[in-house]
Image (cartoon, rainbow, N blue to C red):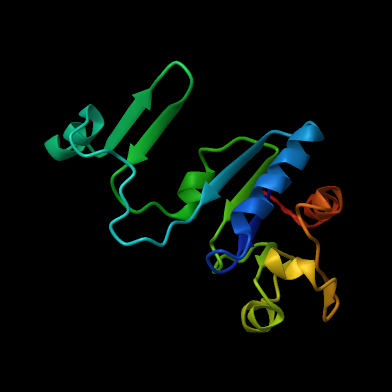
């Protein structure tokens, strides 16, 4: 089965992470393997801890630092990486992106209110979720689904609308 991909985007505190988590849980309950990539918009974001061994590796000039532990592993790349480069390293049934409002992929818009929906709605949006879903069920023909209450319905849409890579 080719990997399928969609993105969840919206402003901070709109319900993006909650929506992604509920999609992940429901996809996993259906037997799919799922991966995520989150876009972070924080200047000078640091994943590593100053003074620790991996940080010292960076300071010594490593371009990629790998960290392997009994329960998880991570590769840290000390440069901006294009999304397609990251995607090439993932082999799952589904890839859910959090953020990435500018990509041309099927998307779920998370918003706090109808005004934000109006301002942020893109032609690639197949569903709206987030805090706005507590008081809106449809917006100009686009379904609005509360991920906490209706994750199965939301994931039915994700299965149908995600892009096959």
Answer yes or no: is residue 1 visible: no
Front residue of 142/137: it is 137
Residue furthest front as drawn = 134
Asked if residue 77 lies left or right of residue 59, the reply is: right
- Picture coordinates of residue 85 (x, y %)? 46, 48
Residue 139 visible in the shown view: yes
How many numbered dots are placed on residues in this image?
0
- The residue shown at (17%, 33%) is 56
Which residue lies at the image location 76% right of the left edge and 54% below the top edge?
147
Q: Is residue 89 left or right of residue 16?
A: left
In depth, the one of 111 and 41 nearer the eye is 111
Question: In terms of image quadrants, where is residue 95?
Answer: top right
Locate the N terminus and report the quarter of the image it occupies: top right
Closest to the observer, 130 or 79: 130
Q: Nearer the viewer, residue 85 or 138?
A: 138
Q: Residue at x 85, y 48 (%)?
A: 152
Quarter of the rendering containing residue 55: top left
Q: Residue at x 38, y 34 (%)?
A: 75
Left/right placement of residue 121 relative to residue 36 reads right
Residue 97 percent coordinates (x, y): 59, 53
The extreme left residue here reads 60
Q: Where does the image place residue 116, in percent across and percent down from the top left?
A: 63, 79
x and y percentages locating residue 43 in the rendered image: 31, 62
């Amino acid at each position: 089965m080719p990997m399928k991909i969609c993105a969840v985007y919206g402003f901070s505190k709109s319900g993006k992470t909650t929506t992604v988590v509920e999609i992940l849980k429901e996809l996993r309950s259906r037997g799919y393997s799922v991966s995520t990539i989150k876009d972070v918009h924080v200047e000078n974001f640091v994943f590593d801890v100053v003074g620790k061994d991996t940080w010292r590796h960076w300071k010594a000039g490593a371009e990629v630092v790998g960290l392997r532990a009994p329960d998880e592993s991570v590769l840290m790349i000390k440069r901006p990486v294009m999304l397609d480069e990251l995607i090439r390293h993932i082999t799952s049934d589904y890839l859910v992106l959090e953020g990435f409002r500018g990509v041309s992929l099927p998307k779920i818009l998370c918003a706090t209110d109808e005004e934000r929906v109006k301002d942020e709605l893109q032609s690639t949006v197949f569903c709206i979720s987030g805090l706005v879903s507590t008081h809106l069920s449809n917006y100009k023909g686009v379904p609005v689904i509360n991920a906490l209450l209706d994750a199965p319905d939301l994931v039915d849409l994700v299965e149908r609308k995600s892009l096959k890579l």
